Image: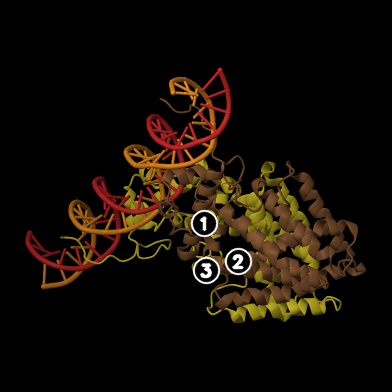
Chain colours: A brown, B yellow, C orange, D red
Amino acid sequence: MSGSRTREPPPGAVNEALTERGRLTRSRILDAALELFRERGYEQTTMRRVAREAGVSLGNAYYYFRSKEHLIQGYYARSHDDHLAACTPILERETGLRTRLRGVLEAKIATSAAYHQFAGALFKTAADPRSPLSPFSDESEPTRREATRLLERVVEGSDVRVSGDLARELPHLLWLYLMGVILFWIHDDSPRTRRTYRLIEHTSSLVARLIRLAGNPLLRPLTDSTLRLLRELREDGEGPGRQSL
Amino acid sequence: MSGSRTREPPPGAVNEALTERGRLTRSRILDAALELFRERGYEQTTMRRVAREAGVSLGNAYYYFRSKEHLIQGYYARSHDDHLAACTPILERETGLRTRLRGVLEAKIATSAAYHQFAGALFKTAADPRSPLSPFSDESEPTRREATRLLERVVEGSDVRVSGDLARELPHLLWLYLMGVILFWIHDDSPRTRRTYRLIEHTSSLVARLIRLAGNPLLRPLTDSTLRLLRELREDGEGPGRQSL
DNA sequence: TACTGTAGTTGAACGCGTTCAACTAAGCCG
DNA sequence: CGGCTTAGTTGAACGCGTTCAACTACAGTA
């Protein structure tokens, strides 16, 4: 009995309160994990192998990552950064809503291509509502907010004007749309996931037209009750987290 | 070396080629599993405990169920049977599309209520595209087909007439809608999942109105390109399985 | 320099899902 | 009855994710 007596929970995903040495070790572990994920997928990658590849002990890997699943958050962060970088030129160049939407969606798929085969296992854990990795979880709120803001920029920077209530909800709806596209992509086993690109090509046009139509008198009641529903569901939730689906 | 030399793959989920004794044992295992799932959830239930509770050995449980996940298919089957039974009176009584749709959706949620807390873990495995339990997998095709047929009856038995092309795709779209509702329900932690009921109440009305509007000249191009997309995506798939998402 | 607390690190151990070679029981054919 | 086949059954063993008590390295303090 010589060591410390209480142990704080491991640092986990966030890069805070780590010494230089710690940051380096953490990074080595994550790099090893992502490479193994790409090479042989999620299930086939063992924590023992990750630790060995990173040159640390098994227990040490768990010091930096609460669980095998938590390694995935490292992937999330990197994936979003890549996506953002790929979107910038598109959002600066294009002004049409359809083109902007399509470009952003295609960028997400293109930047994720290398991880397509292990993305299934990824969503497997993400689908569990109790998992902190669920895209709907409180813990994912920061990432979700960033993605939503990106979609907000897609609409705001376009030549389409959207009225107040809809403008507020639209980014969330588009985020749901993005989740749907990703879900499709995960299940897409066509060569180069060409079916997903086809889906994006068609649905981006569809969605852009729908947004334009939303103000039309014929569709007004439909639009209104949709917006009312979204508001109600949001108010109904007990926390500030808990998105509208 | 006295026993048999080759071993067929275990019977798995289907109830075929089992002796009376086998059927009984299988049923005892499944009953034990479902009870434990209800009591303490999926993860907290161990195969050893299931076997003990069923009064069989650990290995024997694996003789009837290829894996722990495969126990879930037993849940699927029972859940669908319950749903079907609950829907029959509704479909015989109601004629309005909105009411029929709402009734069928509510029945799904109501009959699943007891399993709400473990349904998350259920969908967790179901979200993996490689898993045979994925609702999109080839192995789930029979169940999916049955559910789709139920939704077909919802439309056909109603007082709304739908034209040919749309009539063919509509059941698949409604099945997707049902999947979305279930996904929402899984993440719904409001008391008695009342937010899900609110969602159903509003969206069933919305969807019914959309179906009526689909034939409207203003929306005709939108409807047409949606249908074209669905057809294309289906043709693009290489197998007869692989639904349109 | 010695002392102390903490970040970082270790590997044995636990419980789990899963596998498999071997066993038992029951039916069938001569 | 005896021999054969096959459905049904067993539990030890394997590999994995995860935990944890104990260790080491190092920075700060007196």
Quarter that holds the C terminus of chain B: bottom right
Label of residue A31 in the image: 1
**Alpha carbon separation for disc pair 2 and 1:** 16 Å
Can residue A2 be seen? yes
Labels 2 and 1 share a subunit: yes
Name the residue type under label 3: Pro
Q: What residue does disc 2 label?
A: A112
Chain assignment, label 3: B
Can residue B154 be seen? no
Name the residue type under label 2: Ser
SS under mark 1: helix
Labels 3 and 1 share a subunit: no
Label of residue B89 in the image: none
SS under mark 3: helix
Up-down relation of residue A181 to residue A133 (above or below) = below
Looking at the image, which is closer to me, A96 or B58?
A96
Image location of residue B99, percent across then percent down? 75, 60
In the rendered view, does B214 fall on the left or right side of B114?
A: right
Image location of residue A49, percent across then percent down? 41, 54
Looking at the image, which is closer to me, A134 or B104?
A134
Quarter that holds the N terminus of chain B: bottom left
Local crowd size for mark 1, using a 10 Å CA cut-off: few (<14), some (14–19), many (≥20):
some
- Does label 2 or label 1 sit earlier along the sequence? 1
Label of residue B142 in the image: 3
